[in-house]
Amino acid sequence: MLSTRKKIVVIADQLIRMKGYNAFSYADIASTLNIKNAAIHYHFQSKAVLGKAVITASREKFKENTTLWCDKSSFEQVAAFIEMYSNNRKNNCICFMGALGSSFNTLPDAMKQELTDAHDEITVWLIDVLKQGKEKQEIDYDMTAEEMSDLITSGMLASLILDRVSKNAVLDNVKRTLLTRIEKKK
């Protein structure tokens, strides 16, 4: 069973991904968990502290996932990474980077730094997987690993947002296109 602190982080994460950081309050969390605002303040003295905890939890989940994926081929690791975005859509959410990135200039400094660190970790991991995949001839692409990493992350992030607006399956189209783009041609 999750502790109250972890439940608060989970609910805050969902609210950030559904509504945005600036659009939720402690009252939203309190009503969902049927607790008083004071209980949230006990664990998180400010919304900024809670926001940073949400980003930290997302970073930890990403590290757990990449550890689980490490025995897969490079193509399978990139596919698993891309699938995370599909999982967000299934939960009617966008990714934490997109949800918080759109409010970056209004975030408290500690959250900005945590989000920047998360972006750097994701980028370094993805570039490494892409480079290893090309060296092992498991995947192929016609640009630098850095450019391919940017194309994958920005394409998936944007497609989650556009999926909300469009009646078309933007995420599915982008996902299929990106995976086809890196697939090793026989």
Image (cartoon, grey):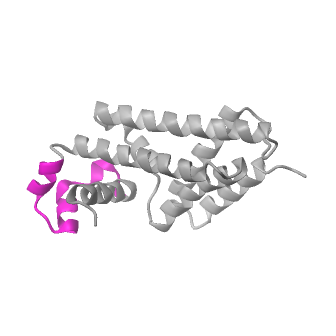
Q: Position of residue 103 (x, y in %)?
A: 37, 41
Q: Which residues are magenta?
A: 19-43
Q: Residue at x 48, y 50 (%)?
A: 64
**162 relative position to 137: left or right:** left
Q: Residue at x 12, y 56 (%)?
A: 39
Q: Is residue 83 above or below residue 151?
A: below
Q: Position of residue 139 (x, y in %)?
A: 78, 46
**164 relative position to 70: left or right:** left
- Rendered image quadrant of residue 108: top left
- Residue 157 in view here: no
Q: Residue at x 62, y 65 (%)?
A: 169
Q: Is residue 30 magenta?
A: yes
Q: Position of residue 18 (x, y in %)?
A: 38, 59
Position of the N terminus, as image quadrant, is bottom left
Q: Position of residue 65 (x, y in %)?
A: 52, 52
Q: Is residue 94 above or below residue 149?
A: below
The answer to which of 28 and 110 lies nearer the viewer is 110
- Rendered image quadrant of residue 145: top right
**168 relative position to 41: left or right:** right
Magenta highlight: main SS? helix
Q: Is residue 171 magenta?
A: no
